[in-house]
Image (tube, grey):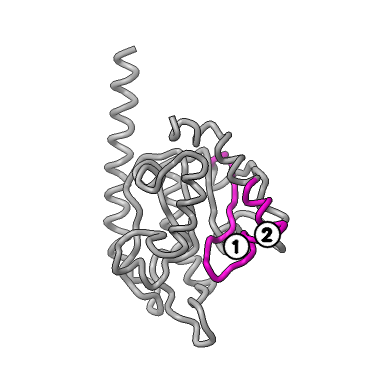
Amino acid sequence: MIYIIDETMAGIVNTIELIQSHQKALAACRLCPAMIPPVILGQPVASEILLIGQAPGDKEGGLGRPFAWTAGKTLFKWFASIGLSEQDFRQQVYMSAVCRCFPGKNPKGGDRVPDKKEIATCSQWLHKEIELLQPRLLIPVGKLAIAQYLPVNKLVDVIGKKHELQVHGVTVDMIPLPHPSGASTWHRMSPGKELLAQALDLLAQHESWRRLSA
């Protein structure tokens, strides 16, 4: 039994080292000229849960971590309601995103949505993280993140459900969440409010989440 524990720990250490090397290369990426660095990264944890955001906002660059501003406060309130504080979440869950740099502002208001070329270019980093982590649970946050894996006509069609998928050769459970933006009312009104509660309940019941909470 001691041998098994030692072997498991050695595997975790090796994965963390690979993730650290991956993040070093990612932090140096400047392939999208319209994107505004720095690259925003979560902690290099060997987690079986992968959270996938959309893209950082304008505040995250100065604070140096994903979901560091208003939307993050709402997101971490959701997670606290099912037993995991922000600090514990950041230390135990790998936080990724569709795009890792701030896309800039939309002249018509709000943040610019990354274009298809930028999403395709940045997807190589997310694919590598899935390869390294072999996650069991994906949590895409927001329509752009969800749409990388599921067809999304309306959020009501995908939120509040657990989806089993093959993602880059890995079988995963996916439990999507709406974006916690303060500009969105979807998660504060019916049926979004009830579907969000269902999604959080599914997360709380998932074996990977229960291991974190324990």
Residue 132 showing in the rendered view: no
Give residue 178's mark.
none
Q: Is residue 50 left or right of residue 199?
A: left
Badge 1: residue crowd in 10 Å (few <14, some 14–19, many ≥20): many
The single residue placed furthest to the bottom in the displayed view is 107
Q: Is residue 191 left or right of residue 77?
A: right
On-image quarter of the C terminus: top left
Q: Is residue 96 left or right of residue 177?
A: left
The residue to which callout 1 is attached is 143
Instruction: Report x, y in % for residue 76.
Output: 45, 52
Residue occupying the point 52% across, 83% down = 109
Residue occupying the point 60% across, 54% down = 149
User: What segment is highlighted magenta in the picture?
Assistant: 170-197
Residue 31 forms part of the magenta stretch: no
Residue occupying the point 36% across, 40% down = 46
Badge 2: residue crowd in 10 Å (few <14, some 14–19, many ≥20): some
Instruction: Report x, y in % for residue 179.
Output: 55, 61
Local secondary structure at mark 1: helix
Check whether the beta carbons of the residues at disc 1 and disc 2 lie within 8 A of each other: yes
Residue occupying the point 33% across, 39% down = 15
Residue 69 showing in the rendered view: yes
The residue to which callout 2 is attached is 155
What amino acid is at disc 2?
Leu
Work out how far the residue at label 1 is from the one at label 2, CA to CA, in angstroms. 7 Å
Lower sequence index among marks 1 and 2: 1
Name the foreground residue: 92 vs 1.
92
What amino acid is at disc 1?
Lys
Would you place residue 83 above or below residue 43 in this image?
above
Name the foreground residue: 104 vs 186.
186
Instruction: Report x, y in % for residue 90.
Output: 37, 47
Local secondary structure at mark 2: helix
